Every structure is written in structure tokens, then in C-alpha cells.
Amino acid sequence: MEVDRYLSRIGFEGPSGVPSLELLRSVHTCHLLSVPFEDLTVHSGGQVKLDLPVLYDKVVNQRRGGFCFENNSLFYWLLTQLGFQVTVLSGQVKNSITSCYGPPFDHLIIMVNLEGKRWLCDVGFGAAGFSAPLSLDTCGPQEQGHRVYRLRRIDDVHFLEWQKEENRGEDGDWTEIYKFTLEPRRLEDFTQMCQYHQSSPSSIFFCKSLCTVLRPGGRVSYIGRRLITTRFPSEATGGGLETTTRELEDEEIPAVLAENFGIVLQSPLIPKDDTITPPPVVY
């Protein structure tokens, strides 16, 4: 890994010689603002493999993005190169169809231990994701812009929750995103679920070609044959969430990907927006 080249890829320009909370927060947010959360490899004749040099070439040299197994694996590698103490964790995402959790290794996340405190990092989740690391040492609300998150704990299980695009304080309505334990994992532990998400009709990554990236004040997303632009609540939006959708023709999509995400695919994309098959209720 060429660390300076990686940092340039994510638009980070500050000092990086000493691990600090300021550095961790900065590279986390820069990553989300620069590296898309996307599954376009699956829909352009390719296959995702959890090989760090391959992922580095894809994200840094080819200026692509990836889904959680890719973006967070690579971010884990970057943080270790920057001198952070990093642990890979297994998350189980709450399914929006069944309201049940996915299997172990459904989601790859990262814990950083820094100066006696623990931080949850995740640069590979998409629209509901948090923009800066969350403290694992509190169960209270943690505000990020117009949003609020919390990490609720029951025994050794942690639950990441949010109030969607609102912040109604501690007594507001909390929605679970995913759950996890702090048991250390290895990257190779996620190989089977990485294959599952590329081949199962119960996985969003198999059913929908998608790409999304955080922007200052909002988010831009491509799904199937739609481009969705979201502006977060502000005075300019009248205090509410503002979303616009543009329908796309197939021949428009390559230019849309290049213009909005900086992505130029090496193979033709087959747009896909199929209905997700509910998975068996096991967990």
C-alpha cells in the first residue's frame, strides 16, 4: 500500500504521522465523501474477492468503490498502516423485509482502540451509515449533523440504532440498523457471506445495481435506472429532507456514473432493479 496515494484518493490533506482521534475522524469522513458504496462489479461481469492488493488497485488506482467487505477491509488496512490498533468485527444487519437479523458475517465493521477508548468505524454501509466514528463507551445518543445514533448494549451484544432523518432526543423512536459483538474476526471469515451477497436473490447486491456516495449536505445514489439526489434538512430545504429522482435510459448510465461518482467501468453494466426475495427467518 502507498499510504500517501490512498490518502490523496480520499481527499485527505492533513498530517498523518501520529494516530489521534482527530485523524481517525477525518479519514473516516473523507473516505465516505470520496469512495462510493457500490456493487457494480457484480453487475458488469466481475466477481468480488477479498484480496487486499486487488481491492487497493480497484479503489485507489481505478477510483472505484465497493460494498462493506471491500471498503471496510481496505479501510482496516489503511488504519493499521497509519498506526491505529484495529479489530475486525462481524455485524448482522436487520432485514427491512423480515425485521429479523442476517447471519453472522453479514456485515464487516471495524473497532479502533485509541488512548483507552473504543470507536466503531464503518465506511461501507450506505445511506443509513454514520459519517464519523461512534463511541463504544457510551449508550447515550451521539449526534451527527441532523441525525442521531446510539449503541445500545444487551450483555455482550451491541445494537446500532438511529432515528432515521430526525433527532427527537433520547426519547425519540429508535430503529435498529445492525447488531454485533466485539469478538475479533479475520478478513477470510467473511468469504462465504461475500459470495452469498453476490449470488443470492435475497441480497440487495444481487438484485439491484447500485452506487451511492455521501456529499456535503446530502447524498447522491444510483439504483437500477434511477438517479436519486438527496439534500439533508437545512434552512435551504425548509427544515425537511429533499429528494429528487431522475429516470435514466440505459445508454445514459455510463455517463451518469462517471459524472456523479467518477466511475468508469471496464465492462458493460447490466442495470438491475429486481424485487428482493425475503430470506428465511433464521436469526
Image (tube, helix red, strand yellow):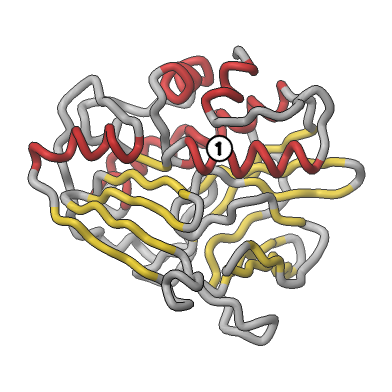
Residue found at the far right of this picture: 116
Across and down, in percent, residue 100 comes to: 46, 68
Figure check: 59 above or below 91: above
Residue found at the far top of this picture: 2
Figure check: 51 above or below 223: above
Figure check: 80 above or below 208: above
Residue at point 53%, 20% (across, down):
52
Q: Identify residue for label 1.
A: 31
Q: Is residue 143 left or right of residue 71?
A: right
Residue at point 72%, 37% (across, down):
87
The amino acid pointed to by label 1 is His
Say if residue 271 shows up in the picture: yes
Across and down, in percent, residue 160 comes to: 62, 63
Residue at point 28%, 56% (across, down):
228
Q: Which image quarter is the N terminus in?
A: top right
Q: SS of the residue at dot 1?
A: helix
Depth order, front residue of 108/220: 220
Depth order, front residue of 242/267: 242
Say if residue 187 shows up in the picture: no
Figure check: 79 above or below 98: above
Q: Is residue 247 left or right of residue 265?
A: left
Q: Is residue 124 left or right of residue 19?
A: left
What number of labels is visible?
1
- Graded by Cα atoms within 10 Å as few (under 14), some (14 to 19) or many (20 or more), the crowding at tag 1 reads many
Dividing the picture into quadrants, the one containing residue 64 is top left
Dividing the picture into quadrants, the one containing residue 146 is bottom right
Residue found at the far bottom of this picture: 171
Across and down, in percent, residue 250 comes to: 9, 41
Residue at point 24%, 52% (across, down):
227
Across and down, in percent, residue 113 comes to: 82, 41
Q: Is residue 123 left or right of residue 253?
A: right
Depth order, front residue of 12/143: 12
